[in-house]
Image: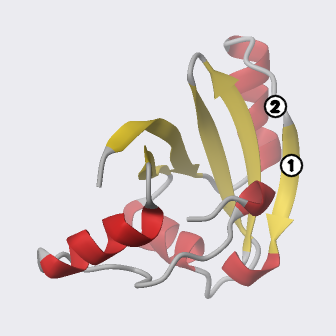
């Protein structure tokens, strides 16, 4: 397992539209698109920032992991995605180290990315 970069930083928000006002109007960082990922019960918006991206995550279902995160912790940083050379190998190594995994096998997220 070799980490190669920070792919993106996910931020849980109550409203993508409201959050985009800050990112676009205050910081001048433009959204490249909004996408719903039905399997994850989330709507996402990506904002390129240097060599990485900020991903805004809005729950589309009150039972989704993002909704539960916001309910428990409030809006804020939800995750940091680290790009690796081999995702399957990285998951196996994390499992062998005894780390708690959300998923033991890769799945597909926004933009069809394997996560």
Residue under label 1, please give it: 34
Which quarter of the rendering shows the C terminus? bottom right
Q: Residue furthest toward the left?
A: 97
Which residue is at the front of the view, 43 or 51? 51
Identify the image quadrant of residue 64.
Answer: bottom right
Which residue lies at the image location 61% right of the left edge and 88% below the top edge?
63
* Residue in view at x 53 percent, y 48 percent: 10
Answer few, some or many: residues within 10 Å of disc 2's Cα (few below 14, many 20 plus, some between 14 and 19): some
Q: Residue at x 53, y 76 (%)?
A: 106
Quarter occupied by the N terminus: bottom left
Residue picked out by circle 2: 31
Instruction: Identify which residue, 25 or 51, lies in the foreground.
Output: 51
Q: Position of residue 53 (x, y in %)?
A: 61, 33
Q: CA distance from mark 2 to mark 1?
A: 8 Å
Image height of 104 relative to 47, above or below: below
Marks 2/1 in contact by CB < 8 Å: the verdict is yes
């Amino acid at each position: 397992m070799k980490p190669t970069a920070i792919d993106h930083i996910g931020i849980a928000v109550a409203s993508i539209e409201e959050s985009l006002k800050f990112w676009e109007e205050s910081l001048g960082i433009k959204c490249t698109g909004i996408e719903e990922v039905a399997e994850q019960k989330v709507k996402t918006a990506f904002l390129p920032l240097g060599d990485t991206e900020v991903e805004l995550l809005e729950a589309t279902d009150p039972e989704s992991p993002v909704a539960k995160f916001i309910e428990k912790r409030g809006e804020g940083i939800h995750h940091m995605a680290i790009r690796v050379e081999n995702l399957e190998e990285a998951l196996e190594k994390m499992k062998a180290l005894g780390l708690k995994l959300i998923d033991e096998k890769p799945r597909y997220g926004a933009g069809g990315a394997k996560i």
